[in-house]
Image (cartoon, rainbow, N blue to C red):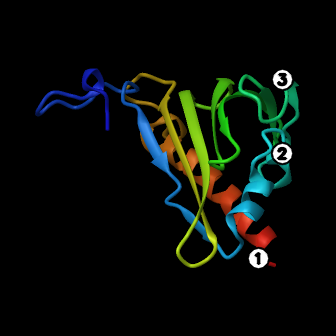
Amino acid sequence: MLRPWLRPRAGERPPAGRCRSRLRSGGTSFHAGPVEVWNLVKRFDGLVNWHPAFSGSPLVKGKDGQVGAVRALTLKDGPTFTEELIAFNEQGMTYTYGIVKSPLPIDHYQASLTVKANTAGGSTVTWIGTFKRKNPRDNVPEAESDAGTMKLISGAYQAGLQTVKKMLEK
């Protein structure tokens, strides 16, 4: 839900680039148990091991699993950006991180990845992110629009989670 100061008044369209987008992966289910899934996805510097879009994810500051750690993510097509670990809960199998610096068309990005047991005896991973687009103008290229940025982040979440699924359910 938008914070009150970001919600448009009745009959108004929200200002371009001002609304915060919230995107949820929808929860991807796995036959593998939560501990097995968590052990694959929990390393803050290990995204490169399970996400097909990245060629590198080394830590440039801090230690894995410690709040304040910073990773440098390199996309396979070249650009690099940095993310900081904001919260990490080993027992709760969840972590939260935010983008520090990025060439992506989004700003104020923060996301959480959580692994939980499900009723089928496996696990469910939920990846939730909030962000807003960088370009505040009304007429922007499709890739920089609200729909374009939602598609970008949604695609990233789905690509990563589908790869995890393939890796664990061979």
Three-letter code for the amino acid on which mark 1 is drawn: Glu
* Residue at image mark 1: 169
Residue found at the far front of this picture: 91
Q: Quadrant of residue 59?
A: top right
Residue 79 horizontal/vertical position (percent): 79, 32
86 on left or right of 143: right
Residue at 58%, 42% in the rendered image: 112
Q: Quadrant of the N terminus?
A: top left
Q: Nearer the viewer, mark 1 or mark 3?
A: 3
Q: Earlier in the sequence, mark 2 or mark 1?
A: 2
- State the residue position of label 2: 46
Q: Residue at x 16, y 30 (%)?
A: 12
Asked if residue 123 is positioned above or below residue 99 in the image, the reply reads: below
Residue 62 has which mark?
A: 3
Q: Residue at coordinates 77% horizontally, 64% vertically from top-left?
A: 36
Q: Secondary structure at mark 1?
A: loop
Between 59 and 157, the one nearer to me in the picture: 59
